[in-house]
Amino acid sequence: MRIDIITVLPELLKSPFEASILKRAIDAGLVSVHFHNLRDYSSDNYKSIDDTQFGGGAGMVMMIEPIDKCISQLKSERDYDEVIYMTPDGETLNQGIANQLSMKGNIIILCGHYKGVDQRVRDHFITKEISIGDYVLSGGELGAAVLCDSIIRLIPGVLGNETSALTDSFQDGLLAPPIYTKPRDYKGWKVPELLVNGNFPKIEKWREEQALERTKRRRPDLLED
Ligand code: ADE
């Protein structure tokens, strides 16, 4: 998989890809991530990428031309499955979207800034708009990092068996059950007896019940229809 990220702040985005599971996935050649500084596609001497709104109003708008140049350059080099725009008014990211995107070959992610991009960018270049939640960030970069993390960990081979994504919360539509490790008794706080006596069918059933119970209590919305 190849991910191209278009941003005005590449430095804000780089560190998540230089550590942990994301770095391992990149080093193993399972994914490549490329950063493109939008200012490199600006056509004036000031490297401007934004301007005031037509019709008046506070806040700057990202101009179409540098974005067109950058996306067109990338598209001339390879085909893309999705061109994603990070925006608070997009579709809210969930595990289903992450699963779908993890099966794509090449994607572009455009990070918004200021008031956002000229609507014509959204109308003519963007195939998917994603929000990471109902709050406003100062730019799309942190959202893009969250999106990439959620996608990359699902690419086959990225997680070992010990961290398999199949048992994550949301993967079966439920929250994950409680988990424990040694010691069995800490200051009198004990691990449920059932988990330490090795009856695996019983343990499996207990985990399913706990997952359902936790989901009912914390996220009843996940159980609707
Ligand atoms: N840019 C600003 N806020 C955002 C959000 N909540 N999700 C994605 N991109 C954003």
Image (cartoon, rainbow, N blue to C red):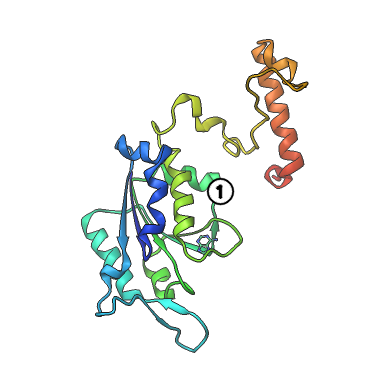
Q: In the figure, is residue 52 to the left or right of 168?
A: left
Q: Quadrant of the N terminus?
A: top left
Question: Residue reaching furthest bottom?
Answer: 55
Residue drawn at 63 percent across, 19 percent down: 182
Image quarter of the C terminus: top right
Percent across and percent down for residue 46 are: 28, 79
Q: Quadrant of residue 158?
A: top left
Work out whether residue 203 or residue 7 is closer to the camera in this orientation and state it: 7
- Res. 136 image quadrant: bottom right
Q: Is residue 160 left or right of residue 44?
A: right
> Residue 121 in the image: x percent, y percent?
39, 71
Q: Is residue 49 above or below residue 216?
A: below
Residue 42 vs 105, above or below: the answer is below
Label 1: few (<14), some or many (≥20) within 10 Å?
some
Q: Which residue is drawn at the image coordinates 31% and 34% (left, top)?
A: 28
User: On the rendered structure, is 99 left or right of 50?
Assistant: right
- Judging depth in this view, the residue of 79 and 213 nearest the camera is 213
212 to 14, vertically: above or below: above
Q: Secondary structure at mark 1?
A: loop
Vertical arrangement, residue 35 with respect to residue 17, above or below: below
In front of the other: 31 or 124: 31
Q: Position of residue 160 (x, y in %)?
A: 44, 27
Residue farthest front in this picture: 187
Q: Residue at x 37, y 58 (%)?
A: 11
Question: In percent of the image, x 21 and y 56: which residue is there?
Answer: 77
Query: What residue is pinned by disc 1?
Result: 94
- The reply, left or right, for residue 190 in relation to residue 27 is right
Residue 166, x across and y down, in percent: 53, 31
Q: Amino acid under label 1?
A: Asn
